[in-house]
Amino acid sequence: MKRQMKLIFQILKYAEANVHNGEPAPMPEFDEYSRSEVEYHVKLCDQAGYIDYIHGGGKRKAPVSIENLTWAGHDALDRMRKDGCCAKSDDG
């Protein structure tokens, strides 16, 4: 699956707006992306150190909620906003 920076940006904005007082936010849903695309990109955000997520049990360990936006995630989101990353091409 190809990395989509527009989706990364949307996930980080979602985490910023929806994680409050230590309460995780449910997995985001975006009309233009499938559930598997969102799950994959949430995992990429975690691997990059931008967010922490809570996963379900079982073999697949799919993300079920976003626990927090990290310091690095806030910095990345600020950079993306400043650079206008997602107004341009979606090629990561």
Image (cartoon, rainbow, N blue to C red):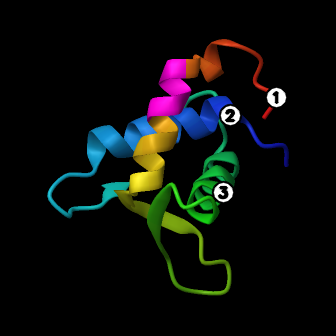
Query: x and y percent of residue 57 in the render?
Result: 52, 84
Q: Secondary structure at mark 1?
A: loop
Find out whether the residues at labels 1 and 3 contact each other: C-beta distance under 8 Å. no
Task: State which tag comes first along the sequence, 1 or 3.
Answer: 3
Q: Which residue is mark 1?
A: 91
For the stretch drawn in magenta, the main secondary structure is: helix
Find out whether the residues at labels 2 and 1 contact each other: C-beta distance under 8 Å. yes
The Cα atoms of the two marked residues, 1 and 3, are separated by: 15 Å
The Cα atoms of the two marked residues, 2 and 1, are separated by: 7 Å
Of the numbered discs in the image, which one, if any, rests on residue 5? Answer: 2
Q: Secondary structure at mark 2?
A: helix
Of the numbered discs in the image, which one, if any, rests on residue 44? Answer: 3
Please provide the residue range marked out in magenta: 78-82
Task: State which tag comes first along the sequence, 2 or 1.
Answer: 2
Task: State which tag comes first along the sequence, 3 or 2.
Answer: 2
Amino acid type, callout 1:
Asp
Amino acid type, callout 2:
Met
| 86 with respect to 88 (left or right) | left
| 90 with respect to 47 (left or right) | right
